[in-house]
Image: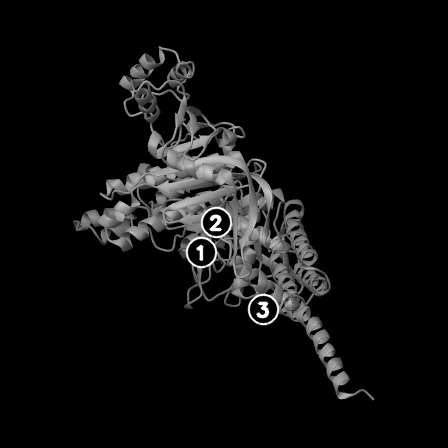
Amino acid sequence: MLNLKEKTITLRRWLNWSLNLLAPLLAVMAGAGLLLIDPPLTQTLRQSVFDQYQRVYPRVYQPVPVRIIDIDEDSLNKIGQWPWPRTRIAELVERLRAAGVAAIGFDVLFAEPDRTSPKAMLNIWNLPEATRRDIASLPDHDEGLAKTLQPGGVVLGFALERDGSGAPLPAAKHRFLNIGASALPFLHPFSRAVPSLPLLSAAAAGNGALTFVPDNDGVVRRVPLLLRLGDTLVPSLVSELLRVGLGEQNYLVRTSSVPGVGLTEVKVGQLTMPTTASGEVWIHYTGPVRQRTLPAWKLFSQTVPDADLKGHLVLVGTSAQGLMDLRFSPLGGVMPGVEAHAQMLEQALSGSFLYRPAWANSIEALTLVIGGLVLGALALTTGALVSAFAALLSIGLIVAAGWLAFIHFSWLLDPVTPALGMVAAFVLSSVIHHRSSERRQRFVRAAFSRYVSPNLVTHIVEHPTELELGGRRQDCSFVFTDLAGFTSLMETIDPGAAVALLNAYLDDMIGIAFAHNGTLDRIVGDAVAIMFSAPLPQPDHQQRALDCAIAMQRFAARYSADLKAQGIAFGDTRIGVHTGEVIVGNFGGSTIFDYRALGDPVNTASRLEGANKHIGTRICVSEATLSGCTGIVVRPVGRLVLKGKSQALRVFQPIHDGLEIAGAAPDDPQYAAAYALLTQDAEAALPAFVQLAETRPADPLVKLHLRRLQQHQTGDLIVMTEK
């Protein structure tokens, strides 16, 4: 018999094993629930993915006999405001019919009598009775349009509404043949129609619904072929235009043999169009195509060759903003509603359809179940890197499969829901698996509080064994900055305001350092020290340091100028840059670590920063740093013997350090020539610098060497007596 302690241990192990097994199962069940429920959030994510597919890989336009006659702004300006007289519409129909078009579809509604008809005018004009009789005898515009429609080939549109009832049904010129169960239960339902005038509807060769059913975000991704009006099946405008253009009378509507699945395809003549369960066709949009559209005014001006229209399916619609037929497109932005109809017709004629296969839900569910269980098992039994790599690889494969299915087969497969389920399984399993590492994570988080620079934090996380006292020799570059006059500024403005200005200044200065992957060594008041090539060696640390210093100086100059323009005497920033071997590591005690560099190069960089004050420059960079840099234009300052040093250090000033050097060329050859005379102790050095001072009196190096020469100091050796 097991004793109580052994039973407790066994029970705990069983509970742990059950919890480990339950985590991926719960995630998989949640994902399966998302597939079944399909909430708005999941729909939005899936639709966003499908939109991205189209934006990256839009349909390539292929010339097919489909054209839009666009009632655009120019047409309204040239012909007159909308609605145009029905005589003008009749003229348009006759012009298209004379050009030999296959069929004409009006993406506009003729639901009201023409207000410009003679009889309509009688209700407005106050005329003598004889004149009224003469006008009443004139032909009615609507009757004239009806006669124009009677020869055939014209499809009119009608609107559908979900509220209301009792309106007459549009005249039906078609027949539906069903294969399988009735399609009515699966179609988008509407209760009321707003048809064209009965006179026109009866004369037209077909009548189709203009109604779109956008998604919940308002984007038109699908165009319906069939819709439900009460208990009646009605075609859409594009369906009727195809039927009339092909000279057919019947629609063949096929529903799935699997109960409850819905429609699978609609056939018109020899054209078979795969549909959604609700009788819609996914649109694979192209970008804007000029050949697709003809402005209506050109048609009336007889400038469109008949060859451009012969045998075409023609849609008459509008892109004018004032007529309010604008829709959201998956490609972004808005488009005229007639554009969606035209692109649907192009797909039908070219046979290039987007569709979501009937088995899509099954394959997505299977992917979720298998992937979620596999990732959950890996997260429970392997290390974090292995399981994370497996998760990323799996999700990447799902995304890639969805993309390849789209571009090669025009299938719309949803990678979002399976990926979410798999991620949930991975996360839950990882949480359970990594409970034992929480103590280590707390230790690392505590270590984070002792460091500032992001690259240092990353290094410690990846190398926690280096959290110990001691250091190592390392070649590093250092950038030291100081802000002149900040103490005086504190005395002239509110201290709180001064601190706010300083914090904003330091925030951007440190941000620039981090952008160059530098490590914050310390902040002392308004001074900042940055080091490069620590904690991780950087082969280009000299280049990084000098680029960082120049970027800092450019920012500091702008910041100071902006504040001075506001009347705030914010000081100038001075920067020193030097490179050398130092000891880098953790210094301090067991309570807190101070990660920094120790060695003479650190002090030298600080002294170079201070030298700017006496030289007049903003940046001083040593030859040791400059030797590892390219693409930087500099001028020699001289050989400086810094305070407390015995050996001279060759120092340079970057020309583009945020200062404008008036009269100087980009590489300043005039200064270089004068400096060469200075190094040679030539008598011509003084006249050369006198001449330079006349053309650029504000140049700090010109003033420095001119002053030295006037004090009978020759050569380029400068001994600094102050820090």
Q: Earlier in the sequence, mark 3 or mark 2?
A: 3
Q: Is residue 87 left or right of residue 66?
A: left
Q: Is residue 288 visible?
A: no
The amino acid pointed to by label 2 is Ser
In front: 167, or 221?
221
The amino acid pointed to by label 1 is Phe
- What residue occupies the far right of the structure in this picture? 1
Marks 3 and 2 sit apart, C-alpha to C-alpha, by: 26 Å
Instruction: Give SS at disc 3.
Output: helix
Marks 3 and 1 sit apart, C-alpha to C-alpha, by: 34 Å
Crowding at label 1, few (<14), some or many (≥20) Cα neighbours within 10 Å?
many
Crowding at label 3, few (<14), some or many (≥20) Cα neighbours within 10 Å?
few
Query: Dividing the picture into quarters, in which one does residue 468 lie?
Result: bottom right
Q: How is the image coloured?
A: one colour
Query: Dividing the picture into quarters, in which one does residue 379 lie?
Result: bottom right
Residue wearing tag 1? 158
**In percent of the image, x 54 and y 56: which residue is there?**
47
Q: Is residue 328 left or right of residue 24?
A: left
The amino acid pointed to by label 3 is Ile
Instruction: Give SS at disc 1.
Output: strand
Q: Position of residue 533 (x, y in %)?
A: 56, 41
Q: Is residue 611 left or right of residue 249?
A: left
**Mark 1 or 2: the one toward you:** 2
Q: Earlier in the sequence, mark 3 or mark 1?
A: 3
Residue wearing tag 2? 329
Residue wearing tag 3? 37
Q: Position of residue 188 (x, y in %)?
A: 52, 63
